[in-house]
Structure formats: C-alpha cells, structure tokens
Amino acid sequence: MNDPFHRPEKQPLYAAVRDAVLERIGSGLLAPGDMLPSEFALADEFQVSQGTVRKALDDLAARNLVVRRQGKGTFVAAHTPERALFHFFHIVADDGARELPTKSRVLSCRRRRPDREEAAALHLARADRVVEIRRIREMDGKAAITETVCVPAQWFPDLDKRAIEEVPNELYQMYEERYGITVHRASEKLRAVSASSENADQLGIKPGSPLLEISRVAETLDGRPVELRRSRCLTDGRHYQSVIV
Amino acid sequence: MNDPFHRPEKQPLYAAVRDAVLERIGSGLLAPGDMLPSEFALADEFQVSQGTVRKALDDLAARNLVVRRQGKGTFVAAHTPERALFHFFHIVADDGARELPTKSRVLSCRRRRPDREEAAALHLARADRVVEIRRIREMDGKAAITETVCVPAQWFPDLDKRAIEEVPNELYQMYEERYGITVHRASEKLRAVSASSENADQLGIKPGSPLLEISRVAETLDGRPVELRRSRCLTDGRHYQSVIV
DNA sequence: TCTTATAACTCTTATATAAGACTTGAGGAG
DNA sequence: CTCCTCAAGTCTTATATAAGAGTTATAAGA
C-alpha cells in the first residue's frame, strides 16, 4: 500500500493516523494552540475515510492532547494559565475554595551540576548542568510553600541569566512559549517531613513543624523528564487534593 | 418515537443508550462481573444500530465502568483485589516497589452517632448512625498506618456485629460482595500533621513526628458518599504516589 | 455613500448505520 | 487427546446525514 505514514504491522488504521498526528505535535510541527487540518483534509492526506480520522482524533482528545470544537476545528491543547494551574496545582483551601498562589518571591536562579537525585530524575549525567530556581510562594498573603525547581540547562539555554523579576509565577506556560517545551504529565511523590530551620525561617514557623513535601517530575509528551520540583507546603487550613476515578 | 428508554430532549441517541445501561448498573440489576447483553442484543432492544450501542459502551469503558474483551463480551467492572489495591492504595516504597499492607490489626468496630465532620462528609443527620472501624495496617512487617473508617450504618446493617477477625484487609471487595455497594471513585485530602501520643504509641514513633494524613471520601457510582476514611501514614522510606495526566 | 441586518454558502465536527474482519471458547471428528 | 470448525462476541472501517460556526454577498435604510 502507498502509505504516506508509518504503519508497522497489525496496527489498526486509526492508530497509525493517531500516531502520525501525535508525531507532528511531538516534533513541534504542530504547536500548542494550532488548528489541525480538518478531518476531511487529513482523510485525504492519509487516504482513509473521514470516520477513521475521526476515531484517531477522538483518541487524542480523550488524552487531552487536542481540543475539538464542533464547527470550529480541532486544536492542539495549550497551557492556558487556568489549565496549568487547575491541572498541576493541587493545593486547595479546606473549605474547597481554590486559592491560588498569586505571588512568588524568587530567592535565587543559578546554573550548576545536578546532585544524584536530580541526575537520576532528569536522566542526566553528573557532568551535565541544571538551572535551579528557588522561590517562596505565597497563598492568602502569607508564605506557604518553599520550592526548588530544577531543569536541564541544555534545554533552557539562557534561563539562569534572566532577571529574577522575569521569572513568572507560572512556569509551564513560559517553558512552552519561550523554550517550546510542553509539560504534559507529571508524577508527584508526597511525604510528611519536619521543617528544617531554613524552612522554618522562610515560612515563619517553628523548626520541626510538619510540612507536606511534594517531589514532582514533569514530563514532555514523549516521556522525557524536563523538571524536578521539590516543594514543602504548610498544610494549615489547606490540603492537597487528589481525585481517584 | 417508540422509545423503550428515557430520552429527555436533544440528547444524542448513544447517550440515551449509555444512560440506560448505566441505570441498570447503578440499580444493581447488572452486578459487577456480570456480562452485558451483546451489542446486537442491546441494539435490538433499544431499536438502534449496533454502532450506536458500541459508542455507548465505548463511553462506559472509557470511564472504567465496563470492561470489554473482543471475542468474549462486555462485563461490568468488578473490584478484583488487584484493582482495588492498585487503584485506591497509593502508598509506595521509595524505590518504586509496590509493597502492599498485608496485615491489619482491627482495634475496634462499633456503632455510634457521627461527629460533625462525618455527618457532613457522608450526608447524614446527626441522629443517624455510623459504623466505625479502627485499625492499624502493617507494611513491610511494621505498623505503618493508623486508620479510622466510617460508613453509614443503614447501608451496612450488621457490619458492627461481625467478629473483628472477619473484617478483611481490603474492605471494598467486601462492601461489594456482602452489601452490594460498589465504590467507584474517591477524593482524598492530604495534610502533614504531628503524631499525637496515641499515634505515637500505635506506630512506635515519637509524639510530634510528622505523619501524612489522608482523609478519603469514597463514593458509589451515582455519587453518594459511602465511606469516610482517615489515615495517618508513616512516610519513612515510603511516599504517596500521585500521577497527573 | 455608509452602515447594518440577514440570507446564503462553506467549512467544520457530530451522529448514525452498515458491513466485513478479527478473537475467543466450546464442541465434535479423528 | 488433539485438531478443526463454527458460533457469538467485539473491533475496524466506510459512508451518509445532521448540526454548529464563521464568511460573504446583498439589499434596505439612514
């Protein structure tokens, strides 16, 4: 058959179409926010019926990779500020209100070698470099979270040189817009820990107070880890919300 | 039209079929593990095409309500021990190994009035009754979790009278098999807290040590809360794993 | 002439149906 | 006991029709 796209063996047609589109998204050929070709256009291109393309796109939509709107078109999912926060920020006030961290104070932003944990999480060699951002995020007007963000320096060339004021509160949108890196999924490990004296200073609490430690590894579409983020949160009148479906 | 099933207004056909099947599952007419009628049988019954039924069932499968197996049939999802644990138990060893709580020691099992928090979470009046089970779960041979489970007494008639030894380690399968109540989704709130002296005794740690508190509300298919479970976990060499997709 | 309302058209996704292919398990022939 | 066949499922693909959302052209009115 004269396939303009790759079809290994016994894979269904719609899966091949899905993967072909996925490939274009992953490679950046289709950027977040872009409109995909119409179902008929894709059907024509891949020499399949519109229903087959439809199934492929439905599949992608089910994974939140594209957004479909009747009459308008199909679009590559983008990191809107809301989506980023609602999706990746799980700290919620006890009354259920979603108070978001409005302000964040950057303590430092520098380039250095990764420690063992960072190298493992980000699949780096010890000789590679990471950019580390340390900051304190406020919620409800008070310091609530200390955060250390680590990303591979090679993918974020000049991040360490940017002025501290330039680092926005929400990083993922910047990753996408400025470096073309879309964070798609993340895995978080939660622990209860005692506040160090440094934590205590930063958050205005007593050393030894219990803090919720969140260690997040964020990944791109193709599964490459792009960020290790270690946070310590004051869960006083707040909690981490997790929904099991 | 001569609809044997309810179709409010401008709802698509497949959605009506989906809801009709959902209704049968929710009402217990189709119990977990049961095989559904075939696509053609349902199509005949509802006077629609097989493709429409297929779309309805695909929808249910996407929500993990049914399991489809080519050549065999479509089945109502059941709480196998594995599914229950993998799905609802998120404590994992730091090396990634999934060590599950093999043993649990039941401390008490009694019937009483709900406190304010329980009444709110379970949608009960203060005059109603709950059954409370308190237990300690072991991981890797050591006490690791203290747990207080609260369920409405009306739905679990004789649960408090069952011998303590009869309470299995995994409760959800028992809920389903013995009381016909299927836990379908849950929402968990996580906090870092200090161990009380009672916690300290139970877990063999010092009072004031940080513990991960998990407060879970479990719901049935139709959204009714059936269980409030408050756990306090020792996150020493372990963590709570959360995946954000 | 400029503005505005609206009808017609086009492009898009959504829904419904049908037909053939594949998978599984059970039962009978050898 | 083994292999084959077949029936009953679901899975894949294709096609037709419906419905939503812009765009453009036209005509009426100020």
Image (cartoon, coloured by chain):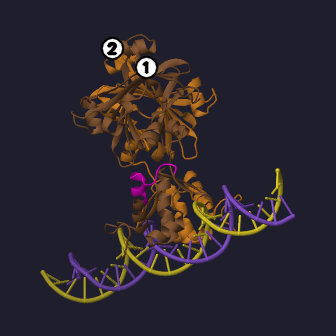
Chain colours: A orange, B brown, C purple, D yellow
Give the quadrant of residue A45. Answer: bottom right
Residue A214 in view here:
yes
| Residue B112 among those drawn in magenta | no
Residue B120: quadrant of the picture = top left
Q: In front: B39, or B186?
A: B39
- For residue A91, above or below residue A232: below
Give the side of residue B148 with respect to residue B59, left or right.
left
Name the residue type under label 1.
Val
Q: Position of residue B170 (x, y in %)?
A: 48, 32
Magenta region: B21-33
- Residue B173 lies, in percent from the top left, at 48, 38
Instruction: Specify few, some or many for label 2: CA neighbours under 10 Å numbering under 14, 14-19, or 20 or more.
Output: some
Residue occupied by mark 2? A206
Secondary structure under tag 2 reads loop
From the viewer's perspective, tell me whether residue A84 is left or right of residue C26: left
Q: Position of residue A77 (x, y in %)?
A: 45, 53
Q: Where A83 falls versus B102 (above or below)? A: below
Q: Are marks 2 and 1 on the same chain?
A: yes
How many marks do you count on the picture? 2
Q: Which residue sits at x=36%, y=21%? A: B193
First in sequence: mark 2 or mark 1? Answer: 1
Which residue occupies the foreground of this view, A94 or A173? A94
Between residues A234 and A96, which one lies in front from this camera angle?
A96
For the N terminus of chain B, which image quadrant?
A: bottom left
